[in-house]
Image: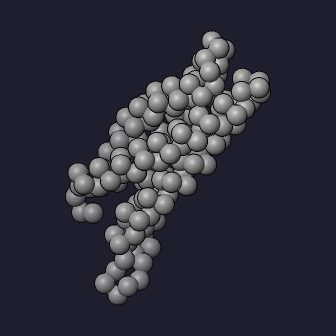
Amino acid sequence: MLQEYLKLNKNILIAFASSISVSAIVAQLLSEQAHHLNTTYTTITDYVIYFSVFSGLFYFDNKKKYYLESGKINTSKLKHDLKKLITSLGIAEIVYTIIRWFLQYYFLILNYDPYFASIISQGISTIIYMMVVNLSVKLTRLYKNEN
């Protein structure tokens, strides 16, 4: 069970590391845009990169978990776990998006460099995201002992 939490957190952190780098570049490239547009486009970029990387890593770490001895996919277990995962990530994503958007916007208003505003806002939001997602995974019992 602990190994499952560690894999999940590893995947989240690698995905965030990827998205933080690309988002900072996009924020700087769009530095001439209005603050709200820069923040919105950077947040969209963040999501595209994060979910692409996270989905790939999660798939590779868990694909064997859902195969039966016959070689078929245990669709009921897969659906059950995906509902719990989407619920856990969804709650955390709402919190993350609100905090990240407002922090980046605030830092841009304070005249921080766009790449730095993006990095700081994403870093703070990621810490809060990690706390919320781990609490949500625990509450939804995604990784209970029978897994």
Q: Which residue corresponds to the image point at 66% horizontal and 37% vertical from the top-left?
A: 26
Residue 143 image point, x, y percent: 30, 55
Q: Residue at x 40, y 69 (%)?
A: 63
Considering only vertical position in the picture, is 122 above or below 79?
above
> Image check: 26 left or right of 133?
right
Q: Quadrant of the N terminus?
A: bottom left
Image height of 142 relative to 21, above or below = below
The number of callouts visible is 0
Which of these two is toward me, 83 or 134?
134
Residue placed at 23% from the left, 51% from the top?
Answer: 2
Residue 37 visible: yes
In the rendered image, residue 23, in percent from the top left (x then y), is placed at: 60, 38
Q: In this orientation, does residue 141 appear?
A: no
Query: Does residue 56 appear to the left or right of 27 in the view shown?
Result: left
Identity of the residue furthest to the bottom in this view? 70
- Of residues 78 and 127, the one nearer the viewer is 127
